[in-house]
Image (cartoon, grey):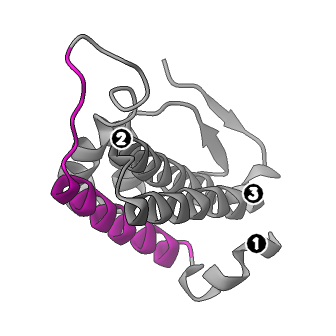
Amino acid sequence: MTRHRSNPEDSRHFRDWVNAAYDDLRAAKLLLEDNTLNNCTAFHCQQCVEKALKSFILCRTHQTVDGHNLTWLCRRAAGLDGSFKQWLSESATLNRYYIETRYPTDIPTEISDATVYRLYKLTEEMFYYVTDEVGLTDRLDDLDAY
């Protein structure tokens, strides 16, 4: 169940969500360069997109949303701006890495170097798309100031 919390003060906190997403993007890049922790890289990719989508929704609706399902978040964003429909398939791809990369399972999740690189590039594209939509692409160097 996803809850919505509305608070007029919340809308200005969308920058905090962008900053948190940017931290995950940078963590994913460092892990990608390390080339040994593909599961952790994939998890940070999923987290980056989740937080970026939540920042967009918060910016547009003044509501924070709970939940981790990227496809649901992307559909919600598409309801606010139809251009987000282009990311539905990609959000579904990244969605599977929320649980599978964090917990041991009977069948371990093996993520190849090629797959994790593709996930990172996809995450980067989605992150910059969202930051452009909320008007922060040109201010990424200043994000730590928020």
Q: Residue at x 40, y 66 (%)?
A: 33
Q: Which callout, 2 or 3, points to the residue nearer the camera? A: 2
What distance separates the C-alpha of mark 3 from that of mark 1? Answer: 14 Å
- Disc 1 residue type? Asp
Q: Are marks 3 and 1 in contact (CB under 8 Å)?
A: no
Q: Which mark is residue 144?
A: 1
Comparing 142 with 28, the one in front is 28
Whichever of callouts 2 and 1 sits on the residue coming sooner in the sequence is 2
Query: Callout 1: helix, strand or loop?
Result: helix
Q: Which callout, 2 or 1, points to the residue nearer the camera? A: 2
Residue 4 in the image, given as x and y percentages of width and height: 61, 32
Query: Callout 2: helix, strand or loop?
Result: helix
Q: Which mark is residue 13?
A: 3
Q: Callout 2 environment at 10 Å: few (<14), some (14 to 19), or many (20+)?
A: many
Q: Is residue 54 magenta?
A: no
Give the magenta range: 107-134
Q: Which mark is residue 39?
A: 2
What distance separates the C-alpha of mark 2 from that of mark 3? Answer: 29 Å
Q: Which callout, 3 or 1, points to the residue nearer the camera? A: 1
Query: Callout 3: helix, strand or loop?
Result: helix
Residue 44 in the image, given as x and y percentages of width and height: 47, 49
Q: Residue at x 46, y 33 (%)?
A: 68
Apparent side of residue 110 relative to residue 139 in the rendered image (left or right): left
- Disc 3 residue type? His
